[in-house]
Amino acid sequence: MAGEDDREQEARILPPDYSLWEKIGSVNLDLIFTPHAIEEAQRAITEKSRDLLDEVASDMKSLDRAWKELSSSPDRWRGIFPNIVSAAFAIKTKAGLGDCELIATVSKSLQLFCEQPGRHGLSERDIEIIAWHVDSIKRLVALKISGSGGDLGKAILAEMEKIKPE
């Protein structure tokens, strides 16, 4: 078969690119990432964590806008889902960096739910699940819940288990 021969000829092993190594030479990362440097970086991240949570507000507006559009026009879900996914990803990332694990977890759950492959439509249950996620994220952000959220976090995670896709 000609097709198989073509594929064999296309596959090649390329040599590694050492251009960066040639520029900087052999570097010991333990000298760069010292325990003191890591502590300082962690301290800076912790100090800025509230700022990151404040930045989530604009992403929350985007998510809320996309949710309102979806709830009023569920038949247009294909065009709206990328906006939900984008906003949920941004919230997940900023919340995770800002030590807001629970917000990041719920946002990730929403993102993954909307990215499910093979989706051919949007059921009432799907809309309810998205609404639950959006409402939960909104409330957690408004309350500025940090960490895993204690007992509230446990209750939310238990609810997430109940609404997993069938």
Image (tube, helix red, strand yellow):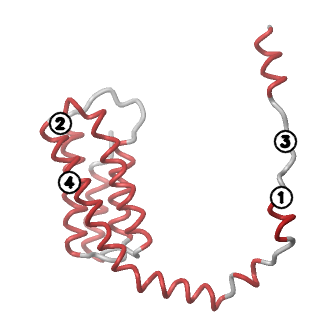
Q: Is residue 2 above or below residue 88?
A: above
Q: Which residue is depicted at the point 28% across and 75% down?
A: 145
- Amino acid carrying mark 3 in the image: Leu
Disc nearest the viewer among 2 and 1: 1
Q: Position of residue 125 (x, y in %)?
A: 20, 39
Report which residue position mark 3 lands on.
14
Q: Nearer the viewer, mark 1 or mark 4?
A: 1
Q: Position of residue 115 (x, y in %)?
A: 39, 41
Q: Residue at x 39, y 79 (%)?
A: 49
Instruction: Identify the disc placed on residue 64.
Output: 4
Q: Is disc 2 surrounded by few (<14), some (14 to 19) or many (20+) residues within 10 Å?
A: few
Callout 2 secondary element: helix
Residue marked by disc 2 = 124
The CA span between labels 2 and 3 is 50 Å
**Distance in Å between CA atoms under marks 1 and 4:** 46 Å
Per the image, label 3 sits on a secondary structure element best described as: loop
Give the spatial CA distance, label 1 vs label 3: 14 Å
> How far apart are the two marked residues, 2 and 1, measured between alpha carbons?
55 Å
Residue type at numbered disc 2:
Glu
Q: Earlier in the sequence, mark 1 or mark 4?
A: 1
Q: Give residue 104's quadrant in the image.
A: bottom left
- In the image shown, does 23 or 129 lie closer to the viewer? 23
Q: CA distance from mark 2 to mark 4?
A: 19 Å
Image coordinates for residue 23, horizontal then vertical, percent: 83, 67
| Residue 140, numbered label | none
Circles 4 and 3: CB atoms closer than 8 Å: no
Q: Residues within 10 Å of mark 1 (few under 14, many from 20)?
A: few
Residue under circle 1?
19
